[in-house]
Amino acid sequence: MMIDELNQRSREIFRRIVETYLENGTPVGSQTLARTTDLGLSPASIRNVMAQLEAAGLLYAPHASAGRMPTNTGLRLFVDGLLEVGDLTREERDTIDSHCTAAGRSFEDVLGEATALLSGLSKGAGLVLAPKADAPLRHIEFVPLQGDRALVVIVTESGLVENRVIDLPIGLPPSALVQAGNYLNARLSGRTIDETRAEILAEIDQHRAELDALSARVVEAGLATWGGDSQDTLIVRGQANLLNNVQALEDLEHIRKLFEALDTKNELIQLLDLSRQAEGVRIFIGAENSLFGLSGSSLIIAPYANRNENIVGAIGVIGPMRMNYAKIIPMVDYTAKIIGRILN
């Protein structure tokens, strides 16, 4: 259904119901609307309109004797057709500017600060998808972790530091990591990861690499692992804010399922990749994605671009479907623009 298919009276009652629900989080009844609004309609007239909106799939009653709440479809219709997006105050803009542009911090620190800031301002969980380091490199180092894993520390010529975790061949000795790091650092200066990878694999194919077999496996395993989108850096901050917004054990269980899904990251990465395909703020509500359908949550997200105007990352807020869209949408949009400005 499109918003223009509703007559003026239905549209206004629907708008009041959704706005009241977003503010209070409880079902809205006809008596409440008649008493607290200037619609000039009796409770019976309002009930008739509510029944029509329910038949159209825009409202539902959580209990037989309760008022009405918007469905996922109804929330989407409201956001797309009736929501009046506000603007940030000067104080809010200054807060975002000061937290994101402080000198002397790495870009990853800036992203973490921006995510925490969005979490605090929105009372949701802030998240950011950071770009892979495709700039020319200065240094690389492998740090052994527990099990057959290693932390890869990558430093670009511009000073950006990026950390990635890779899986190693079983039984690889620590000395092989040192040899691999020395080997790479002798060849990667001024080259990107892809350029370095292509050169090393060519050497391996031609049997001219100066590594032993174990070191060659580190190079192949490590560099191959860096290529996929699933290795993008994902930062999630402020998860406790979601817990503060829940009102029942059922809601708490939904949030627990969301955290479990976040741990896998795969669906979220796919969702964030969607945000790269278009400019501006995108809003995912509830069951529009299986991740948020399970948790009863929504995502407001905006991409940011590099100096070549290529979208390289995204930043946003996860919260309950009952979130303050009018306030959070401009907040996310402005923060994404600041991040893009810093990146450039």
Image: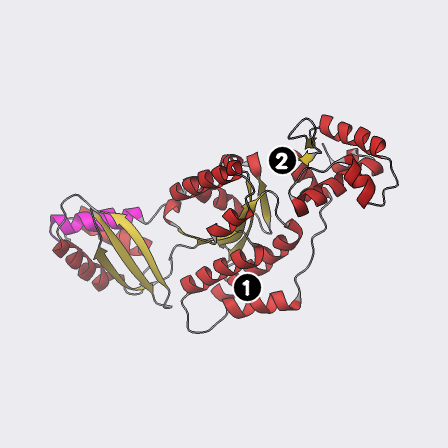
Quadrant of res 16: top right
Chain part drawn in magenta? 211-225
Q: Residue at x 57, y 55 (%)?
A: 122
Magenta stretch contains residue 326: no
Residue sticking out furthest to the right: 40
**Dominant secondary structure, magenta:** helix
Q: CA distance from mark 2 to mark 1?
A: 31 Å
Give the residue at mark 2. 72
Foreground residue among 205 and 139: 139
Q: Position of residue 284 (x, y in %)?
A: 57, 42
Give the residue at mark 1. 338
Magenta stretch contains residue 223: yes
Query: Tag 2's secondary structure?
Result: helix
Q: Position of residue 138 (x, y in %)?
A: 30, 66
Amino acid on which disc 2 is placed? Asn
Query: For this view, does 118 lie left or right of residue 32?
Result: left
